Structures are given as structure tokens and as C-alpha cells.
Image (spheres, helix red, strand yellow):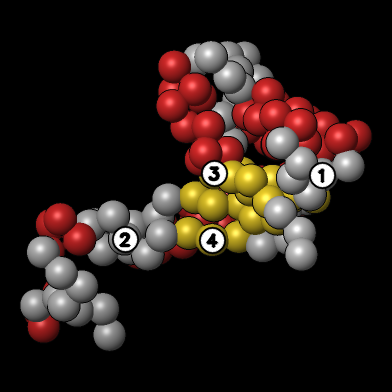
Amino acid sequence: MKLAISTWSFQQRLASGAMTQMDCISKAKELGADAIEFVDVLPPAGVSREDYARQLGEACKEQGLGVSNYTIGADFLANDVQDEVERISKELELALLLGATSIRHDVTGGIQRYGSFHLPMDEALI
């Protein structure tokens, strides 16, 4: 069995600025993880998401950590479907730069808008 740790586990420290995603890599290794999951790519100021994804992927290799997953938000109910597909396609490029072996995205964050996953028939995606 292999253990992976998600950067989501460090979300409070990431949000406060106490950690960066780069810090998460060394912390995951310190905690005994075999791999790490990245939730989004959150570069420091002045660094592109693509460059930071490359840097994160290289740092994982140097630490001997796999990148088990890349997880991002998506919302196919609240956003234009074609726009969301195009945006997610760009995220796939980041997953490749990270060296992720899989990707996961939300289908919607819009459940609050609809109250359930049962859409009114006139809004159903067919």
C-alpha cells in the first residue's frame, strides 16, 4: 500500500500564507508519504502557473514523491459548458507538467443553486 497526502490537508496554512505548495512537498515526504495530490496550482507572485507546475513536478521527483492526482474545481451547471471544457483542457496541461498520474474535477459546485442534482427539465443537459 502507498500513502498519498493532498495539499488540501494543508489548506488552512496555504490560505494564511504560512506554507506554499512547495512546502507541502517536503512536509508530505517528512510525514512518510509516497505521493502527493495537488489541489490546483497556486504560484507565488510573478511566477506563471505553468512554470510553477514544472517546478512542483521537479521538486517531487527530487524528493522521490509521485504525483498521484491533480484536483481542480469545475462547474458545468453554473458555467457555459464549452467555456468550462476549454478551461479544464488547460488544466490538463498543468497536470502533465506536474507529472500527475490522474486528474479529478468537480462536476458542479452549483448544488446550492439547484438544491439538488435533479435539474428542472428545461435546464437539463441532454
Q: Secondary structure at mark 3?
A: strand
Between marks 1 and 4 in the image, the one whose residue lies nearer the viewer: 1
Instruction: Please name the residue shown 65% across and 20% down the image.
Output: 47
Which residue in the protein does label 2 denote? 108
Dot label at residue 104:
4
Mark 4 burial class by Cα count in 10 Å: few <14, some 14-19, many 20+: few
Mark 3 burial class by Cα count in 10 Å: few <14, some 14-19, many 20+: many
Q: Is residue 120 left or right of residue 88?
A: left
The CA span between labels 1 and 4 is 19 Å
In which quadrant of the rendered image does the C terminus lie?
bottom left
Image-quadrant location for residue 112? bottom left
Instruction: Please name the residue shown 53% across and 14% down the image.
Output: 18
Instruction: Please name the residue shown 53% across and 32% down the image.
Output: 10
Between marks 3 and 1 in the image, the one whose residue lies nearer the viewer: 1
Could you tell which of marks 3 and 4 lies nearer the N-terminus? 3
Which residue in the protein does label 3 denote? 39
Identify residue type, mark 1.
Leu
Mark 2 burial class by Cα count in 10 Å: few <14, some 14-19, many 20+: some
CB of mark 2 within 8 Å of CB of mark 1? no
| Residue 63, image x, y percentages | 87, 35
Question: Measured along the vertical axis of the image, is residue 118 above or below residue 104?
Answer: below
